[in-house]
Amino acid sequence: MSQNELLINLEGISFKYPEGPLVLDELDFKLERGNRIGLIAPNGSGKTTLFHIIMGLLKPLSGKLEIFGKPVREEKDFAAIRRRIGLLFQDADDQLFSPTVLEDVAFGPLNLGKSKNDAVQIARQTLDYLGLAGFEDRITFKLSGGEKRLVSLATVLAMEPEVLLLDEPMNGLDIETKAKLTEILGGLDLSYVLISHDFDFLAETADSIYTMADGKILLDEELHLHEHIHAHEHGVYPHQHMISSNDREYRKKGSSEWVSDRRQRKQDRRQRTQDRRQNLEDIRQQSDDGSQTTEVRGQRSESRKQNR
Ligand SMILES: Nc1ncnc2c1ncn2[C@@H]1O[C@H](COP(=O)(O)OP(=O)(O)OP(=O)(O)O)[C@@H](O)[C@H]1O
Ligand SMILES: [Mg+2]
């Protein structure tokens, strides 16, 4: 496996909603294995649209999509990749549809061909991992906003995806839960793209931070290299700066040592990613096509919009 294995490659993607202006305009985007990309951009700039295009929930007007090294054009192509990419919808009500929490979290693994017992076991473990033990029989639509957010994340993680697309995972979470989620993301050996309006969260959880403007992704090389340290000069929004653990570490050690520590951590994560990937390959070989989950949740999202 090459270290720079290209997982997602979008070239020249354009998209508009009916009767609207262009939302994505010849957009290029690449995600390599091991990448942890943060995406911060103003409301309405097309971040959610971009995720839905990657998952095949929206069809681009033009451009090329290659995912896991293969072109994806038709529904059957997307069906194959949806079992390997986990999408956390921006709106938890688009994600959750089963009566109880356990059923919702077990739905994905069941769709991946797991037996009922195994699916329930995976669901329980995932809930436990996210600090949601005891939520199994709770009614999903009666959960609080933050609880729905975490249960939504559980439905995604329970499918053991290789790539995560998380659309504003911090939305509605309290400070303690945000800290917990930051820690959880730090412990995951996955490639991911995180959309957030919280720069400090992205600085903690992403190795590169991108933005969007005029329907395109902009790569900020300075941010890419130096992360949070130059955020004030290159950040998209002016933001209040609270001292984060990274800043304290930086001030204590000086920039070059701090950056090299970050590199070492990245290398360690790559190794863990490789191990996890092997594990996933083994699981995948045992299971049938489990592509329906995102499709079902995506259809639910569309029909909810039409009913509004
Ligand atoms: N179903 C839809 N029909 C028509 N226009 C839409 C639809 N969904 C989104 N749009 C429009 O497309 C543009 C991009 O929306 P999108 O949801 O991708 O933005 P975003 O960057 O995710 O914003 P936010 O930060 O508010 O979540 C916006 O102008 C939005 O109004
Ligand atoms: Mg959005």
Image (cartoon, rainbow, N blue to C red):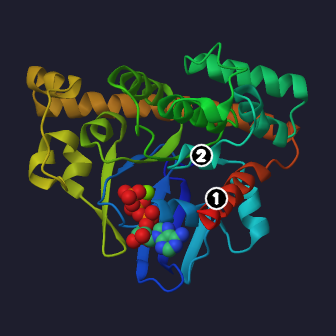
Amino acid type shown at disc 2: Asp
Tell me the residue at 30%/33% (across/down): 204
Residue 68 lies in quadrant: bottom right
The residue located at (45%, 40%) in the rendering is 169
Q: Is residue 112 left or right of residue 86?
A: right
Residue located at (79% from left, 40% from top)? 284
Q: Which residue is mark 1?
A: 304
Are the two marked residues, 1 and 2, in contact with CB atoms closer than 8 angstroms? yes
Residue found at the far top of this picture = 134
Residue 175 visible to the viewer? yes
Asked if the residue at label 2 sits under 8 Å from ligand 2, the reply is: no
Q: Which residue is mark 2?
A: 93
Q: Quadrant of the C terminus?
A: bottom right
Q: Position of residue 138 (x, y in %)?
A: 68, 23
Residue 95 in picture, x, y percent from top left:
63, 45
Gap in Å between the C-alphas at discs 1 and 2? 9 Å
Above/below status of 305 relative to 145: below
Q: Looking at the picture, does residue 287 appear above or below residue 94?
A: above
Q: Name the quadrant containing residue 268.
A: top left
Q: Position of residue 196 (x, y in %)?
A: 36, 47
